[in-house]
Image (cartoon, rainbow, N blue to C red):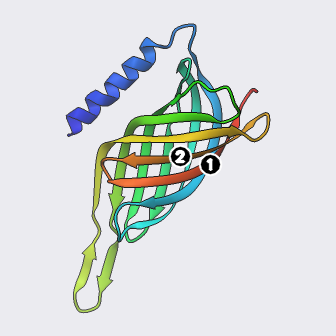
């Protein structure tokens, strides 16, 4: 599994550099935060929060938007996501997009001391999965965009429903 993850990341990096010609608009374009609800199964759900950056477009309509998300229930979940968004052609104010990418997920179980039984728990697990989803983005002002999205991560088998804002730089 580690080899597949490494190869996938290597292919993604090569694709970025392949399409990084003079037509590409790569650079630090915006930064934002997001908040939402996550459901991994019937017993594990909660509030999720995160941050993201907009690194510009590889080709017109295909933007690099990596993110970091965290939520905690009985377990701590941290995901570092290397996502891209494909913006569908639109004539209106609302931009619809598809999300795809890789998510590095770390799940940690805290140690718990039970009187008479000792300490239990205290482990962690990591893995790489696919992020698949869709969303919409709307301008709130000249430099501020609001978004809503639904994302599924295959490694953690979790669905994230999130809303956020992005402050666009240099606009």
Q: Is residue 29 above or below residue 133?
A: above
> Image point 29% across, 47% down: which residue?
127
Q: Which residue lies at the image location 58% right of the left edge and 55% below the top edge?
A: 35
Q: Name the residue under label 1.
A: 164
Give the crowd class for mark 1: few <14, some 14-19, many >=20 residues within 10 Å: some
Q: Residue 21 carries which label?
A: none
The residue at the point 56 percent across, 17 percent down is 60
Is label 2 in a helix, a strand or a loop? strand
Question: In the figure, residue 11 lies in which quadrant?
Answer: top left
The location of residue 15, given as percent across then percent down, is 39, 18
Expressed as whole percent of the image width and height from the top left, the position of residue 26 reads 57, 20
Quarter that holds the N terminus: top left
Dot 2, how many residues are within 10 Å of its Cα: few (below 14), some (14-19), or many (20+)? many
Looking at marks 1 and 2 on the same chain, the residue that comes earlier in the sequence is marked by 2
Residue at which label 2 appears: 149
Q: Estimate the spatial distance between the alpha carbons at disc 1 and disc 2, rounded to whole Å.
A: 9 Å
Task: Name above or below for residue 39 compared with residue 66.
Answer: below
């Amino acid at each position: 599994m580690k080899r597949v993850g490494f190869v996938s990341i290597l292919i993604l990096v090569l694709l970025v550099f392949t399409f990084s010609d003079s037509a590409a608009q790569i650079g630090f374009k915006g930064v934002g935060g997001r908040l939402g609800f996550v459901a991994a199964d019937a017993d594990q759900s909660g509030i999720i929060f995160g941050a993201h950056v907009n690194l510009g477009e590889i080709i017109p309509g295909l933007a690099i938007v990596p993110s970091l998300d965290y939520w905690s229930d009985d377990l701590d979940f941290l995901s570092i996501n290397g996502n891209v968004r494909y913006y569908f052609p639109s004539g209106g104010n609302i931009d619809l997009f598809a999300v795809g990418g890789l998510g590095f997920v770390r799940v940690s179980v805290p140690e718990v001391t039970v009187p008479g039984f000792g300490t239990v728990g205290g482990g962690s697990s990591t893995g790489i999965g696919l992020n698949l989803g869709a969303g919409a983005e709307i301008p709130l002002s000249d430099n501020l965009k609001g978004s809503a999205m639904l994302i599924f991560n295959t490694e953690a088998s979790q669905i994230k429903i999130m809303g956020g804002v992005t402050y666009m730089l240099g606009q």
